[in-house]
Amino acid sequence: HILSICRALTETMEHNEMLFRIGGDEFVLVSPTTGEAELEQRLERVRADLIEATSDDKAPMISSFSFGCSRVDPLAGDTRRQMTMDADRKMYRYKLMHRVQQPKDSDAPQHPIAEQFPCNDRVFQAISMSSETRYPFILNLDTGESQWSVNAVRDFDLPSQHPFNSVDMWLARVHPEDRDNVRSELDMVVNGTWHFHYMQYRVMDATGAYALCDCTGYRLDGTDTEPNMYVGIIINRSLADTTDSVTGLGDIHALINAIGEMRRVARKAGFIAIKVDDIAEVNARFGFDAGDRVLAESAACLMDCSRGKGRLFRSTGPTFVALFDELGPEAIDELASEIERFLGSPVLIGSLEYQPPIRVATLHLDGVDRQPVSILNELKARLKEAPQVPGTKLD
């Protein structure tokens, strides 16, 4: 199946295009094509031809694939991370909207719904896309089969993305001191006594160390045509899941942890807060992908401006905070001025070269002697009073 799709793709490739397999059933096609639409149309034709060629009775199954195209222009400041994230999101959306229904084998024995694998890919992808957690899961309570994210398989050394006997498999990884309590609660979910489950306990990761995890799930009672399901997410508090998915920076949790560490040793600290204005308007007019691009490009420019002298975080929404522990007030103010002058190259949104308006504020403490929330609230107040560095007007 994979080979037939690869042959179809390579037969239509231009001489200066390259196709790579990056793992499993995922491939990357690198093309110098100047526009996404041209490449999308070509891939759509390949997909349609594949479906038509394999839809007769001779083919064992219908061949198809999903794709997402993203254009990157390094001269405009576009980054590789921006391109891959954009293409990945588009591919998942395409997959949700263009699923091919495989024909049923009339001679094959038909099993009741509870015996079939019910971890619907569409449902799982929706959960994955609507949550920033690394570990969403779906469990069929009638069969014990489940679906887990690739991150969960790697980080917790699970046997596969679709393991059977999932409850026992997971309990085997729970710390012995926590196992009985976890087993008791999960038993009540399985037998229908409880429909909501939340616990914090320790789970062995792929390195053999125990990670503190928050586990939250809901039981969905089955019907005559649907199985009993348990759907949830797991957050690894040892990792803190503190990477912002749009920018790749540490998120608000990582920022609070960093400030807390400095408070424990009473170290001096300098802060630069940056707010990108008009993101709500960009989202409303051009879509959330455009807003994410603006934030990702702003983050890349902030990294360049900080030159590795500090740690950069995405605080909340369109707000970033840079944390420095070795620079004095004058150096902090100088960096803030540089950020005001050079924040990002214009982001191309359709035919519009968009330069985001920003606000910048600084704060220097001889010793971090306050709670992180208090410091963040002061930065928020200073940003509110800071003059706006104007950008492109969205009339």
Image (cartoon, rainbow, N blue to C red):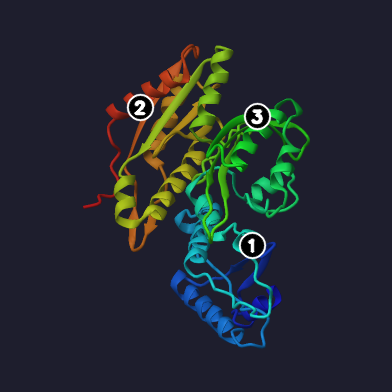
Left-right relation of 120 to 395: right
Q: Residue at x 37, y 36 (%)?
A: 275
Q: Which secondary structure, mark 3? A: strand
**Do we see residue 113 in this rendering?**
yes
Estimate the spatial distance between the alpha carbons at disc 1 and disc 3, rounded to whole Å. Answer: 31 Å
Q: Which secondary structure, mark 2? A: helix
Q: Residue at x 40, y 42 (%)?
A: 342
Estimate the spatial distance between the alpha carbons at disc 2 and disc 3, rounded to whole Å. Answer: 34 Å
* Amino acid type at image mark 2: Lys
**Which residue carries the number 3 mark?**
201
**Do we see residue 156 in this rendering?**
no
**Furthest-right residue in view?**
208
Give residue 188's position: percent from left, percent from top. 61, 37
Question: Is the Cβ of the residue at disc 2 closer than 8 Å to that at disc 3?
Answer: no
Mark 2 or mark 1, earlier in chain:
1
**Which residue carries the number 1 mark?**
116
**Which residue carries the number 2 mark?**
380
Task: Decide: few, some or many residues near mark 1? Use Cα within 10 Å; few <14, some 14-19, many ≥20.
Answer: some
Q: Quadrant of the N terminus?
A: bottom right
Q: Residue at x 37, y 39 (%)?
A: 341
In the rendered view, tell whether residue 325 sits above or below residue 158: above
Left-right relation of 115 to 343: right
Residue 340 or residue 312, whichever sits in front: 312
Mark 2 or mark 3, earlier in chain:
3
Estimate the spatial distance between the alpha carbons at disc 2 and disc 1, rounded to whole Å. Answer: 52 Å
